[in-house]
Amino acid sequence: MISALGIAAFDPTGPLAPWSFTRREPGPTDVQIEILYCGVCHSDLHTVRGEWGDITYPQIPGHEIVGRVSAVGASVTRHQVGDLVGVGCMVDSCRECDPCKRGLEQYCDEGNTGTYGGTESQTGRPTQGGYSSTIVVDQSFVLRVPPSLDLAGVAPLLCAGITTWSPLREWKVGPGSRVGVVGLGGLGHMAVKLARALGAHVVVLTTSASKAEDAYRLGAHEVVVSRDEEAMRALRKSLHVIIDTVGAPHDLNEEMRLLALDGTLVLLGGSPEPHPSPGAFTFITQRRRLAGSLIGSIAETQEMLDFCGEHGIMSDIELIRADQINEAYERMLKSDVKYRFVIDMATLTPASSAPASP
Ligand code: NAP
Ligand code: ZN
Ligand code: ZN
């Protein structure tokens, strides 16, 4: 076993704190990665607080991982020691079911193996995420990171980037598309950058008027404060695709009405409570659709990373020390993220003890 250090949750309500644990030794097809940076996704918070169901504690979250390969198994062909690589939200899947065979591992019939909160097929132990010093992952789930980009800004591409890229591609966003992005947080700001780079006209819908200036800087053509009823009415029937990143229950009727004929509202947010169901006429009158999307496949993730490398796209981040993670969670709950927290893993030492040990 390999000794490792992480920042773990020990129960649903207490603070995260340093925890020494072990990783498996790399098997023949495994890659061991020294983690340099890990982004902080709202899913981490939902998970460790038990909002998506019971989990095993201690639990180390984190699925926006960038690091350097420090060891490879004997049969590894895709990566070499010293390579800069990334790991996103999943580390394995059954590889035999229909979605897996179609290269859509995220929709594996058996459930993909989450980077944290899953069960390691190799050991039967719980998977532990990227707020940690090192990780061991099968080579098929390890991505190549474009060397031209700042590594800390790349980390959030591994979840926020791919989760917004996948629906933009699935619903064929490009020149001539009018795309709405609801919620300007980690996912939302990546949706703005990616939709803009794909050539779309981008409209940000936010609850935070104070984010308008940033939204324009990130690439939005228009910004609407969603509580402004008049501005919302003026937008009706104008958008082809809406990417909704809000992870809390909210009224979808008004968003549906913003869709043009045949438009699609894609839900990405993992609200623990259901949204009130939109009325039938919001669908019927313009043949509108309501959809969802889960992260993205490994192939799509590589495509997105390569696209970001070519276009110089990274996340706007706030780099934090390991001992600032609890403060970051509190700010995330207040929609106060500009626009992704990323942990500098070099600051993770046993002595860096996070506030109040459990
Ligand atoms: P985030 O950084 O916290 O951003 C969410 C944004 O939504 C906020 O900044 C805020 O933007 C807006 N918002 C409005 N009302 C809110 C409320 N009551 N509570 C929270 N946010 C509110 O979160 P994120 O990391 O982008 O993740 C967003 C959601 O997507 C989470 O539920 C996460 O679990 C989920 N997710 C899903 C997938 C997937 O595969 N589908 C992948 C990753 C994450 P404004 O200030 O602009 O209104
Ligand atoms: Zn995530
Ligand atoms: Zn499968």
Image (spheres, rainbow, N blue to C red):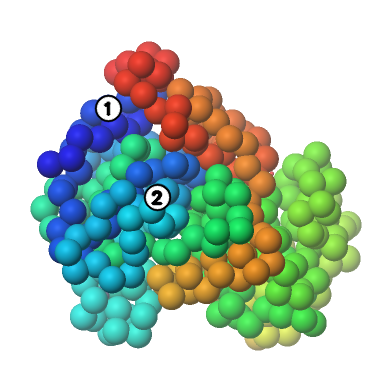
| 56 lies above or below 86 | above
The image shows residue 293 at horizontal and vertical percentages of 49, 69
Label 1 or label 2, whichever lies nearer to me, is 2
| 320 lies above or below 78 | above
Q: Residue tagged by mark 2? A: 68
Q: Is residue 195 left or right of residue 115?
A: right
| 312 lies above or below 236 | above
**Circle 2: element type:** strand
Q: Residue tagged by mark 1? A: 19
Question: Which label number is shown at residue 282?
Answer: none
**Circle 1: element type:** strand
- Amino acid type of the residue tagged 2 in the rendering: Arg
Q: Residue at x 24, y 67 (%)?
A: 76
- Amino acid type of the residue tagged 1 in the rendering: Trp
The image shows residue 275 at horizontal and vertical percentages of 53, 56
In this orientation, which residue lies closer to the viewer: 257 or 313? Answer: 313
- Quadrant of ligand 3: it is bottom left
Q: Residue at x 71, y 80 (%)?
A: 174
Instruction: Work out which quarter of the rendered image holds the C terminus and state it.
Output: top left
The image shows residue 2 at horizontal and vertical percentages of 18, 40
In this orientation, which residue lies closer to the viewer: 292 or 218? Answer: 218
In this orientation, which residue lies closer to the viewer: 151 or 330? Answer: 151
Residue 237 in sight here: yes
Q: Is residue 28 left or right of residue 253?
A: left
